[in-house]
Image (cartoon, rainbow, N blue to C red):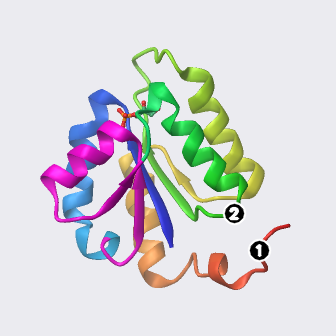
Amino acid sequence: MNIALIAHDRKKDDLIQFALAYEPILSEHDLFATGTTGQRIVDETDLSVTRFRSGPLGGDQQIGAMIAQDEMDMIIFFRDPLTAQPHEPDVTALIRLCDVYGIPLATNMGTAEVLLKGLKEGFIDWRLLGERRE
Ligand SMILES: O=C(CO)COP(=O)(O)O
């Protein structure tokens, strides 16, 4: 599965803790991340990550493009609901595309844990079965 990991600045410590805790599961998949989040994951875990641009510079949109091309299977996006983001339209667009295409999306740690446990149990294997979209 292709999984994107994204965190706003004040949630990055949480995402690193999450990535460390779930490293055995995450390491079995292909990971993608926005720029700064991805750098921290590479520096602070043993996970390999394909890094896109930083979120404010288009990274969310690059991940959104993968969704539109049926190339992304899950998004873990630790959003900061208490801080205004200069690229809020990009954030909204990414979440919208998850809903357009039915892509599992976690925007907080509680849901992210459920998603990864479900991933391990095979609950998201339908992503591998279906016909690719036209
Ligand atoms: O802003 C982000 C998501 O909207 C995350 O971008 P960075 O990982 O580059 O900080």
Could you say which disc has been placed on residue 120 in the image? none
x and y, in percent, of residue 100 in the image: 77, 49
Q: Of the residues shown, which amino acid type is indicated by label 1?
A: Arg
In the image, residue 25 sits, relative to residue 58, either above or below, namely below
Q: Circles 2 and 1: CB distance less than 8 Å?
A: yes
In the image, residue 31 sits, relative to residue 29, either above or below, namely above
Looking at the image, which residue is at 19% across and 60% down? 20
Residues shaded magenta: 27-51
Callout 1: helix, strand or loop?
loop
Q: Is 5 situated left or right of 42 in this image? A: right
x and y, in percent, of residue 84 in the image: 45, 14
Q: Earlier in the sequence, mark 2 or mark 1?
A: 2
x and y, in percent, of residue 51 in the image: 38, 49
Where's the C terminus, which quadrant?
Answer: bottom right
In the image, residue 120 sits, relative to residue 60, either above or below, namely below
- Tell me if mark 1 has few (under 14), some (14-19) or many (20+) residues whose alpha carbon lies within 10 angstroms of its own: few
Mark 2 to mark 1 CA distance (whole Å): 7 Å
Location of residue 89 by image quarter:
top right
Q: Quadrant of ligand 1?
A: top left
Circle 2 sits on which residue? 70
Looking at the image, which residue is at 57% across and 75% down? 124
Q: Is 22 situated left or right of 120 in this image? A: left
Is 42 inside the magenta-drawn segment? yes
Q: Is 125 situated left or right of 49 in this image? A: right
Callout 2: helix, strand or loop?
loop
Looking at the image, which residue is at 51% across and 73% down? 1
Q: Of the residues shown, which amino acid type is indicated by label 2?
A: Asp
Could you say which disc has been placed on residue 132 in the image? 1
